[in-house]
């Protein structure tokens, strides 16, 4: 031998490699998630052993800690530090392994009198599927089925249960939530913040993140969990997500588009929809349509009624309020039958999307005699006019009908009383009377 060899040889002649990266001897450790693969090796570029008869390395596992790991080359096999090489690496596969601790060390088998290298500690933990269970708003979800959709203004809670993980209470037992690179969202607020390591403390079973979308941009994003202090562990399966705008819901009342009523402040969410005007004695149709690529397709939904109860008003709804409907690309239609209703009322309808635990803004319906005709009569010698309104659908006197009165220098509206009549007692020239039909926003001359 051209040089002596002693216990310092490992520190002086070799540098550990983990996944191809050099690591100091006192910092090297192997943290593996079950099913993952890594490499461990030694760099020996400046070693005098290269190309010598004694220049062979072997990897060994401390007895009793093998865990079913598979090594390539196999454990104990002598591997030559051949001329022209600078390192040797062993591939470690953990597909069928048992979780727990293991310890590796290198040997120079041609030097039986030399002690083996410093121990390389390792830990094999459960994979994401075995050790962690995601929850959305308190409901467990299988990893392949996780889909975190939020409508603008909605807040959702993402929880990760880890009671089956062996990292609980350990120094490297920390979780963080982050965006998948290249699939970031905008305007979402997370509590705790994205990227913040959160401890899987002893005695706990889960961690939660609250996600708010009040000022979020519409569109897709992807989230993933990471173990920031557990080196080499892969990220969790991706959580595909999407912020959904209110314009995904397109409502029609009969042939009229129900437009969202926007706040004057851009930072405020949708406040409500414009008012629709159903008619006493009529049958109307409420149609919901979705955009072709809407993420609401396939979701379960139902209609919510608030205000005076529909059965008290004598209103029939088909499908019923108790019926759950699966939204599809063709949309859904509700028949609103007011033919037996005789009472004016203010009603609010909302769409509840059950799968998202979300309720739309309210669609106001102002029920009344909203489609009418009228006649006027003037007594002999009088400048007063008696106006009588009649419901188009019921052919009965119509109270609550708005009559616009205009003249050369002004205008004013009057409303018919409970008997469907109203008196105009002011004298102006060029008087004109018109019924304002709120149902279709038209005027009818009287």
Image (cartoon, helix red, strand yellow):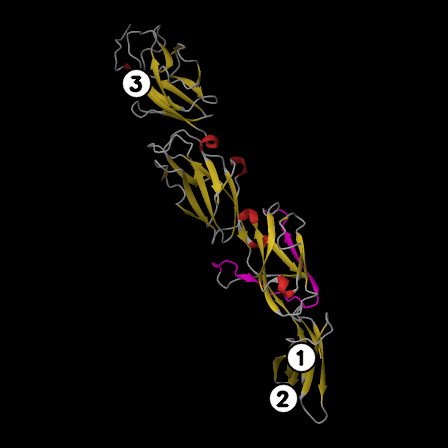
Quadrant of the rendered structure where residue 55 is? top left
Mark in front: 1 vs 2: 1
Quadrant into which the C terminus falls: bottom right
Is the Cβ of the residue at disc 1 closer than 8 Å to that at disc 2?
no
Name the residue at 51% across, 63% down.
263
- In the rendering, which numbered label is found on residue 426? 2
Q: State which region is magenta.
A: 266-294
* Residue most extreme to the bottom: 381
The secondary element bearing badge 3 is classed as loop
Of mark 1 and mark 3, the one earlier in the sequence is 3
Would you place residue 208 above or below residue 432 in this image? above
Of mark 2 and mark 3, the one earlier in the sequence is 3
Label 2 vs label 3: CA separation? 107 Å
Would you place residue 256 above or below residue 136 in this image? below
Name the residue at 73% across, 92% down.
380
Of mark 1 and mark 2, the one earlier in the sequence is 1
Would you place residue 387 above or below residue 290 in this image? below
Local packing at callout 3 (Cα closer than 10 Å; few below 14, some 14-19, many 20+) is some
Mark in front: 1 vs 3: 1
Quadrant of the rendered structure where residue 318 is? bottom right
- Count how many numbered circles sit on residues in the image: 3
Which residue is label 1 attached to? Answer: 419
Would you place residue 4 above or below residue 151 in this image? above
Quadrant into which the N terminus falls: top left
Local packing at callout 2 (Cα closer than 10 Å; few below 14, some 14-19, many 20+) is few
Which residue is label 3 attached to? Answer: 118
Judge left or right: residue 291 versus residue 80.
Answer: right
Predominant SS of the magenta segment = loop
* Residue most extreme to the front: 312
């Amino acid at each position: 031998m051209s040089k002596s060899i002693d216990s310092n040889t490992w520190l002086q002649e070799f540098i550990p490699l983990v996944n191809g990266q050099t690591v100091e001897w006192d910092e090297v450790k192997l943290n593996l998630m079950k099913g993952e693969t890594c490499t461990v090796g030694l760099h020996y570029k400046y070693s005098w052993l290269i190309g010598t008869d004694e220049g062979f390395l072997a990897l060994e596992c401390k007895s009793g800690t093998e865990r079913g790991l598979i090594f390539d080359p196999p454990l104990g096999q002598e591997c030559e530090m051949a001329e022209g090489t600078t390192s040797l690496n062993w591939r470690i596969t953990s597909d069928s392994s048992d979780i727990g601790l293991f310890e590796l060390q290198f040997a120079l088998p041609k030097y039986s009198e030399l002690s083996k290298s410093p121990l390389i500690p390792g830990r094999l933990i459960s994979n994401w599927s075995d050790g962690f269970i995601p929850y959305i708003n308190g409901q467990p979800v299988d990893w392949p089925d996780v889909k975190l959709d939020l409508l603008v203004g909605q807040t959702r809670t993402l929880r990760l249960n880890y009671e089956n993980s062996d990292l609980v209470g350990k120094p490297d037992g920390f979780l963080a939530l982050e965006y998948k690179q290249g699939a970031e969202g905008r305007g979402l607020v997370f509590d705790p913040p994205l990227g913040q390591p959160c401890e899987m403390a002893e005695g706990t079973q889960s961690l939660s993140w609250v996600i708010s979308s009040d000022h979020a941009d519409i569109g897709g994003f992807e989230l993933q969990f990471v173990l920031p202090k557990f080196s080499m562990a892969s990220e969790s399966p991706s959580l595909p997500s999407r912020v959904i705008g209110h314009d995904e819901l397109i409502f029609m009342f009969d042939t009229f588009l129900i437009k969202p009523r926007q706040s004057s402040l851009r930072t405020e969410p949708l406040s409500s929809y414009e008012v629709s005007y159903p008619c006493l004695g009529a049958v109307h149709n409420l149609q919901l349509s979705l955009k072709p690529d809407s993420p609401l397709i396939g979701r379960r939904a139902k209609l919510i009624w608030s205000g005076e109860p529909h059965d008290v008003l004598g209103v029939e709804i088909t499908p019923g309020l108790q019926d759950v409907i699966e939204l599809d690309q063709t949309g859904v239609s509700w028949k609103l039958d007011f033919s037996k209703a005789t009472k004016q009322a203010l009603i609010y309808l909302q769409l509840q999307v059950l799968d998202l635990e979300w309720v739309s803004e309210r669609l106001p319906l102002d029920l009344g005699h909203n489609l009418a005709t009228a006649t006027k009569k003037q007594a002999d010698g009088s400048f007063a006019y008696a106006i009588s309104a009649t419901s188009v659908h019921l052919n009965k006197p119509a109270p609550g009908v708005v009559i616009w009165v205009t003249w050369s220098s002004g205008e004013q509206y009057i409303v018919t009383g409970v008997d469907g009549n109203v008196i105009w007692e002011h004298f102006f020239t060029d008087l004109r009377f018109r019924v304002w039909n709120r149902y279709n926003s038209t005027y009818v001359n009287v």
